[in-house]
Image: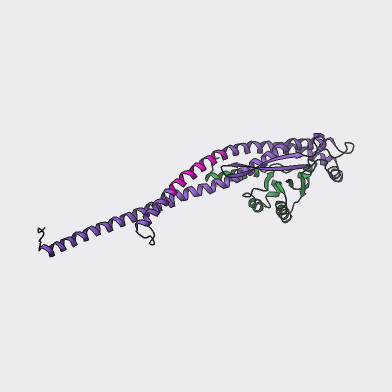
Chain colours: A purple, B green
Amino acid sequence: MPSATINPTRMELTRLKGRLRTAVRGHKLLKDKRDELMKQFLEIVRENRRLRAKVERGLEKANAAFTVASAIMSPQMLEQALLYPKQSVELDMKFKNIMSVNVPVYQFHTKNEDPAEIYPYGFAQTSGELDTALEALSAVFQDMLELAEVEKTMQLLAEDIEKTRRRVNALEYVMIPDFQQKIRYISMKLDENERGNITRLMKVKEMVLQEAHDFKPPAS
Amino acid sequence: MYKIAVMGDRDSVLGFRALGLDTYFVEQADEARHTLHRLAREDYAIIYVTEQLSTLIAADIAKYKTSVTPAVILIPGKSGSLGLGAQALQTAIERAVGADIG
């Protein structure tokens, strides 16, 4: 049942027809957007799974070595060894546009090009396990960065897909049926008025004729 | 220019310091919450949080899911993976698809 506030006029009908056309078009476009987003999303999810497994494996290895190192070395020594890092990392962030969702693309560069620069300590007083741990960490770092990028992308896409899905559903199940119903209501009403008018005109014609010619219609 | 931070207990994050990342040793929920919000306001584009710590501040981490920066990423800490990262992935899929597609 359409809401009570609509006017059954021709102008309202034209307006509603226009809105219905827009809604149908929007629905189609949004549906296409949703499908494409979903396709991208599933690819990214696959990538994310792979990277996460890789990073978790790598970190596990690093943590194991680190645990051994911290068992061998005293906490103070360990702290001291890592107190002043020689290496520092800077991150550049650009944006990539996936179906009008802005997702970050990270690019990092280290201050020191030499890969040996990750050991900020002399080798005399530290255990070899610490070296192993740091090496494992630096090996997994590139993947960690990629993981961050992919995971953020996934989160942003997931949000946008949800939004788009809601819009598609709102159009499909609420707006469009509502417009159609209103249009039907108005055109029914207009047709009914038209019929009422015709009957009235016929009646008037009959009366006018009768007055002019004393005409009697055949008894029906 | 953006920076990268690592939050978690000392043993889990100390190693990242050598790589040139900024490390923050936090173990208490309150402290972690403050640190996270403070880092998010500064120029940190990526904040790695250990899974152990993330269990304490899950609601705060969820806040940053929809913003472009920072990316809060869970990593396994010294006691190994709790599977929370994979679980977060699953939640995102459910949210997007509207159903669990496995």
Q: Residue at coordinates 65% horizontally, 45% vertically from top-left?
A: B84
Estimate the x, y position of residue A70 in percent, counting from the top left: 82, 41
Estimate the x, y position of residue A104 in percent, counting from the top left: 65, 43
Answer with the quarter of the image where residue B13 lies.
top right
Question: Is residue A75 a member of the stretch shown in magenta?
Answer: no
Look at the image and tell me whether residue B87 can be seen: no
- Give the magenta range: A22-40
Answer with the quarter of the image where residue A52 lies.
top right
Q: Foreground residue, A26 or B30? A: A26
Q: Foreground residue, A15 or B100? A: A15
Q: Is residue B34 left or right of residue B87?
A: right
The N terminus of chain A sits in image quarter: bottom left
Q: Which residue lies furthest to the bottom in this view?
A: A211
Question: Is residue A24 a member of the stretch shown in magenta?
Answer: yes
Q: Foreground residue, B5 or A102? A: A102
Q: Which residue lies furthest to the front in this view?
A: A212
Q: Residue at coordinates 22% horizontally, 61% vertically from top-left?
A: A200
Q: Residue furthest right?
A: A124
Q: Foreground residue, A144 or B27? A: A144
Look at the image and tell me whether residue B17 can be seen: yes
The prevailing secondary structure element of the residues shown in magenta is: helix
Reply above or below: A113 against B17: above
Estimate the x, y position of residue B73 in percent, counting from the top left: 68, 45
Estimate the x, y position of residue B87 in percent, counting from the top left: 62, 44
Total residue callouts: 0
The C terminus of chain A sits in image quarter: bottom left
